[in-house]
Image (cartoon, helix red, strand yellow):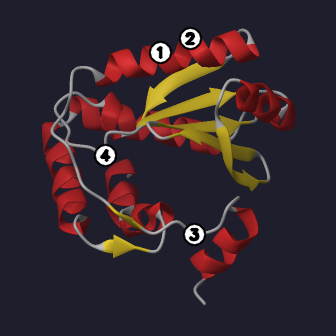
Amino acid sequence: MSELDRHLEEVLVGGLRPVVVELSPYDPAWPLAYAEHRERILASLGEVEIEHVGSTSVPGLAAKPIIDVQVVVEDLDAAVVALEAAGYVLRVREPGHRVVRTPDAVIHLHEPGDPQLAARRRFRDRLRTDPAARQRYEDVKRSLCGRLWPDMNHYAEAKSDVVAELLR
């Protein structure tokens, strides 16, 4: 069993979910979908720091049509309860981080100061402002499409080298 599989066994709620990743061309409706999730999250949690991240936040970048959102909260478990009441489903429970989702969105909940917040923001901003980096990332994503992954996290792990390269 790989280190990733051991980690996922500990943190995933509902176990591995096999997936074949397919990309869609950039859709100008994605920011509108984010805005809908933003309002739903704010209605559930009150005023929190919330951002659209991930590939759907980068104009011109092909992506899985799933909106990624990051939210900063003081109490992860209370936030999960509130978001479950709003129709989100808990998918990941790990120290300092929770993930809730719907079929069209993944919501990353973090405690203040989590380094992942800044890293996701830096990566998004790099892709928004650097066409060569955006194309490099899209090329890698396309090379990984069409195959069966044990879970979406395995697909994300397969992109980790190019993400690290582009964050340097």
Helix, strand or loop under label 1: helix
Front one among 137 and 88: 88
Question: Which badge, 4 or 3, comes first in the chain's sequence?
Answer: 3
Circle 3 SS class: loop
Q: CA distance from mark 1 to mark 3?
A: 28 Å
Q: Is residue 96 visible?
A: yes
On the picture, is 16 further left or further right than 134? right
Task: Quote the CA–CA distance across marks 4 and 3.
Answer: 18 Å
- Residue 12 in the image, given as x and y percentages of width and height: 68, 62
Mark 4 is surrounded, within 10 Å at the Cα level, by few (under 14), some (14 to 19) or many (20 or more) other residues, namely some
Which picture quadrant has residue 83?
A: top right
Residue indicated by mark 4: 64
Marks 2 and 4, how far apart at CA? 22 Å
Instruction: Specify whether residue 112 is in view.
Output: no
Amino acid type, callout 1: Glu
- Number of other residues with Cα within 10 Å of mark 2, as a class: few under 14, some 14 to 19, many 20 or more: few
